[in-house]
Amino acid sequence: MTHPLTSSLMQRGTEFLGCKTAIMCGAMSWVSERNLVSAISNAGGFGVIACGAMTPELLDIEITETKKLTDKPFGVNLITMHPDLMQLIEICGKHGIGHVVLAGGLPPKGSIEAIKAGGAKVICFAPAMALAKKFVRSGVDAIVIEGMEAGGHIGPVSTSVLAQEILPELSTDIPIFVAGGIARGEAIASYLEMGAAGVQLGTRFVCAHESIAHPDFKKAFIRGNARDAITSVQVDPRLPVIPVRALKNKGTEEFTAKQIEVAKLLDSGEIEMGEAQLQIEHFWAGALRRAVIDGDVENGSVMAGQSVGMVKTEEPVADIIASLMDQAEAALER
Ligand SMILES: Cc1cc2nc3c(=O)[nH]c(=O)nc-3n(C[C@H](O)[C@H](O)[C@H](O)COP(=O)(O)O)c2cc1C
């Protein structure tokens, strides 16, 4: 099936990303490595390496290995609170990475400039209107508006509300990619019609054949329903943890215990707030690794969005992208 209507609405996004379809696979720590990223880009989408807690040396290797598997463009996702952020930006520049996605809060001073100086475009997450406007002012090249339906770390507002608030007002100023809760092409078509340049999906791609996620992690996704993908609870009001959406299991309860432990360290003055937040993020990175790599889906963190209920089988990336595009085209034709 050809997709003239969808491709035409995606044109701004595809020109910005340099790929055939403006469908980004959002970076997912431990999942978005060389195999999935190259498969997405080879299938015409836009893959993004999740740097997560990688050292600059490991990111260097991951980019080199991804390049061996694809000659198509792909991006790198960096977490703003990473202690070696500036070195990671340098590695991206050295490899001529075209797009750097900054996640995890406001970019530190100088980071946007450093990415641009290295020749890459900067994409930032905007979970609210005020932040979206701030990014436009600070010269960011594109934004991802991500609703709370998404898997992983989330903001407080739903995708449908963010899209209605932000797309009509800002989509002429900056390319906007919509994320959170998207698993079918009909939804993609509707956001494109509202002015989106493209979309970003995570959950829908976890069970791709090319994804290295453990078979038990994939099974948990295939079994999971929308209502099983719940958000973490903040135990202590002084400890501003970013909520995480994941499938409910024993690991969810362990996070409560971890927060109490970190709050006590804060109380006793043994650590400061920055260190407390870093410890929380290290907890998530470790828990996610246990589930994605080791397959411990009971005690690890099975980060998943509400769209998990629409993930029914393991299939090749190319088939997932083709069905999303077919569904979008049929919706636009109707
Ligand atoms: C298992 C998992 C891990 C994720 N890890 C990251 C990450 O390391 N960095 C990031 O910016 N987003 C991360 N995300 C969010 C995705 O990049 C993407 O924006 C999100 O999955 C889109 O919403 P959806 O899950 O509803 O499709 C993660 C999501 C999942 C499901």
Image (spheres, helix red, strand yellow):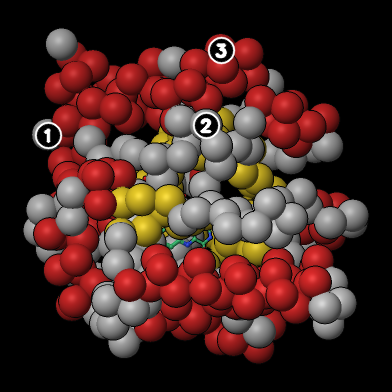
Where residue 297 appears, x then y in whole percent? Answer: 27, 75
Q: Which mark is residue 165?
A: none
The quarter of the displayed image where residue 95 is located: bottom right
- Is residue 167 placed above or below 258 in the rendered structure? above
Residue closer to the observer: 47 or 159: 159
**For mark 3, what is the residue?**
168
- Find out if the beta carbon at label 3 lies less than 8 Å from the nearest ligand 1 atom: no
Residue at disc 3, secondary structure: helix
Determine if residue 255 is in view. Answer: yes
Which of the two residues, 206 or 239, is positioned nearer the viewer here?
Answer: 239
Q: Which-is-in-front pick, marks 3 and 2?
A: 2
Query: Which mark is drawn over residue 1?
Result: 1
Q: In which quarter of the image is residue 241?
A: bottom right
Q: What's the residue type where badge 3 is placed? A: Pro
The quarter in which the N terminus is drawn is: top left
Q: Which residue appears at 52% of the width and 25% of the height?
A: 162
Residue in the picture at 50% in, 16% down: 164
Please state, as top left, top right, bottom left or bottom right, where the C terminus lies in the image. Answer: top left
* Within-10-Å neighbours for mark 1: few <14, some 14–19, many 20+: few
Q: Which of marks 1 and 3 is nearer the N terminus?
A: 1
Identity of the amino acid at label 1? Met
Residue neighbourhood size for the residue with mark 3, other residues' Cα within 10 Å, grouped as few (<14), some (14–19), many (≥20): few
- Contact check, label 2 and label 1, Cβ < 8 Å: no
Left or right relative to 276: residue 304: left
Question: Residue 56 falls in which quadrant of the image?
Answer: bottom right
Q: Is 297 left or right of 319, judged from the image as shown? A: right
Pointer 2 or 1: first along the chain:
1
